[in-house]
Image (cartoon, grey):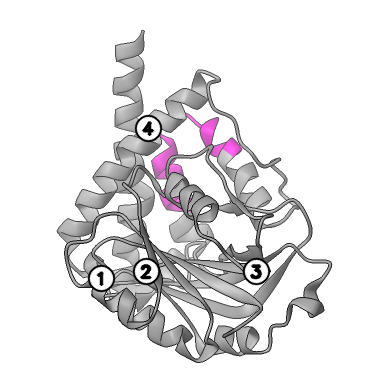
Amino acid sequence: MNPHFSFIILTFNEEIHLPRLLDSIRELDAPIFVLDSGSTDKTLAIAKEYQAEIQHHPFVNHPQQWDHALKHFDIKTPWIVGLDADQQVSPELLRYLQHFKDQDYQNVDGIYFNRKNYFQGSWIRYGGYFPFYLLKMFRTGKGYSDLNENMDHRFIVPGKTIIWKDGYIIEENLKENDLNFWLDKHERYSTLVAKEELERMQKLRTQTLRPNLFGNPDEKRAWLKKLWWNLPLHIRPYLYFSYRMLFKLGILDGKTGIRFHYLHSLWFRKQIDKKISYLKARSD
């Protein structure tokens, strides 16, 4: 059994995704821990087939689910890799992990992987979606889940981080091939984000990370979010869509990619702003 790191995976009805992910990490022979939030398909049977340790916890949001996983699994390895079921390890990332030894990273607390995001079979290469660095590997007992956001989950570590720029994590939610699934999911997400933003306006919620345009990838995103929150409602979705399509060259992502950028940066953001206005009117 791999002595250097373990995998934690979140699941909910992931029979379409879980075999793909578990096959991508099989060669690593690492301990696998699955936190499930009520699957009714073959997810748990698949997890058992791969000798995963399984726990159950009702889903509230991703940050709270990860917080529960980190606090309740008995991880013996010095490092943890946290993955969602619709992700998988690329051959390039697999090679990094095959050669990973804890003693080679004694001054490091966290490692960023480079995400390749796919939507309906197309790699979203432009529009600010690549490169996109996610802190997915961190020292056991040091990495924790940021609970100050409802939606945009991140792990945080107190010490030094590094980036594996060509250590790609592949993310593709096959359920989103059904556009209605994507729309329904993001309709729910828009409610969570709207409530969160209103709490920020009311000074009830703060950022955990220090915003820093020149910091690590998450500090940079914190800086951009702070800028976003100060843009005028109902105008900012159009600014963001234009930024992604033109400045970040999203128009080069082709028909499917352009549809994704429209849905994610304009339609979704418009839903959020509508709900913020509604919630503000109710609270006044």
In the picture, the disc for residue 43 is 1
Neighbourhood count class around disc 4 (C-alpha, 10 Å): few under 14, some 14–19, many 20 upward: many
Give the alpha-carbon distance from disc 2 to disc 1, as whole Å: 10 Å
* Residue 187: quadrant of the picture: top left
Q: Is residue 163 above or below residue 157?
A: below
Q: Are marks 2 and 1 in contact (CB under 8 Å)?
A: yes
Neighbourhood count class around disc 1 (C-alpha, 10 Å): few under 14, some 14–19, many 20 upward: many
Q: x, y percentage for residue 8?
A: 48, 66
Give the alpha-carbon distance from disc 2 to disc 4, as whole Å: 26 Å
Instruction: Identify residue type, mark 3.
Output: Trp
Whichever of labels 1 and 3 marks the residue nearer the N terminus, that label is 1
- Whether residue 238 appears in magenta in the rendering, the answer is yes
Instruction: Identify residue type, mark 2.
Output: Ala
Q: Name the residue under label 2.
A: 85
Q: Is mark 3 on a helix, strand or loop?
A: strand
Q: Mark 4 points at which residue?
A: 194
Whichever of labels 3 and 4 marks the residue nearer the N terminus, that label is 3
Query: In front: mark 2 or mark 4?
Result: 2
Query: In front: mark 4 or mark 1?
Result: 1
Q: x, y percentage for residue 211?
A: 69, 41
Could one spot residue 210 in this view of the protein?
yes
Whichever of labels 2 and 4 marks the residue nearer the N terminus, that label is 2
Give the alpha-carbon distance from disc 4 to disc 1, as whole Å: 31 Å
- Identify the residue at image location x=64%, y=80%: 3
The segment highlighted magenta reads: 226-243
Q: Name the residue under label 3.
A: 79
Instruction: Identify residue type, mark 4.
Output: Ala
Instruction: Identify residue type, mark 1.
Output: Thr
